[in-house]
Amino acid sequence: REGYPSSVHIAYFIPADRLVEGFSTEVFMRLENWDRLIAVRSVVLKVLEAARKDKFIGMSLEAQVKMNANGETLELLQRYFDFLPALFIVSQVEITGELGSEPYSHATDDLKVAVGRAEGQKCERCWNYSKEVGADSHFPTVCPRCSGVLKEIGWKPA
């Protein structure tokens, strides 16, 4: 810092190979899984974009993604199943043996993706579509997840 005014801040960069020091094998596996999940996501996004372009859906949360996979891809999708709607930014994901006659689909060697309309009603809080919107009579316009959150923060319906 010698020769620099005290208001100048100098950044010290860590070499890239040191950024992963101490990572466990499990962490490296998860990083590898992330790359594979992003590859699946890119296939899903292509199908969603086609459905959006044709005005079949307005936004991705209006979609239900159905997937058919085999081998390692199937295992990956099953392992991260609960995370897939958030990854794809859709309301519903289904892994199925057979895809129906959804108007928008795409297939690769080990993955088939189809996009249809999400089932149920739109939650007015999170905008996800769910068959269970209104299941809680205290919060008739939201999904069970949002109902739980509203109760947890002490929200009282008007």
Image (cartoon, rainbow, N blue to C red):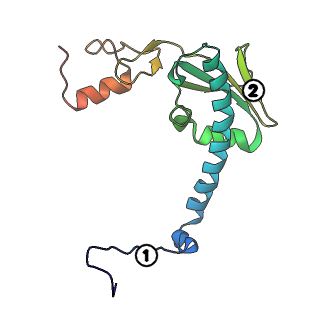
What amino acid does circle 1 point to? Tyr
Q: Quadrant of the N terminus?
A: bottom left
Residue at the location (33% across, 13% down)? Answer: 141
Outermost residue to the bottom: 2
User: How crowded is the residue under tag 1: few (<14 C-alpha within 10 Å), some, or many (20+)?
Assistant: few
Pointer 2: residues within 10 angstroms few (<14), some, or many (20+)?
some
Quadrant (top left, top right, bottom left, bottom right) of the C terminus: top left
Residue sitting nearer the eye, 63 or 76: 63
Query: What secondary structure is found at the residue carrying circle 1?
Result: loop
Q: Residue at x 38, y 20 (%)?
A: 143
Residue 64 quadrant: top right
Badge 2 is on which residue? Answer: 106
Find residue 50 and report its horizontal and vertical position in percent: 67, 22
Residue 59, label in figure:
none
Asked whether 55 or 137 is in front, the reply is 55
**Quadrant position of residue 128:** top left
* Number of marks: 2
Q: Is residue 60 above or below residue 72?
A: above
Specify which label sits upstream in the sequence, 1 or 2. 1
Q: Please name which of the two marks, 1 or 2, marks the residue nearer to the observer.
A: 1
Q: Foreground residue, 11 or 61?
A: 11
Residue 155 location, x and y as percent?
19, 25
Is 61 left or right of 134, judged from the image as shown? right
- Secondary structure beneath disc 2? strand
Give the numbered dot on residue 12. Answer: 1
Point out residue 144 in the picture as x, y percentages from the top left corner.
37, 22
Q: Is residue 48 above or below residue 110?
A: above
Q: Which amino acid, by three-letter code, is at mark 2?
A: His
> Residue shown at 31%/11% (left/top)?
140
Answer left or right for 52 relative to 6.
Answer: right
Q: Residue furthest right?
A: 109
Query: Would residue 4 be found to the left or right of residue 158 on screen?
Result: right
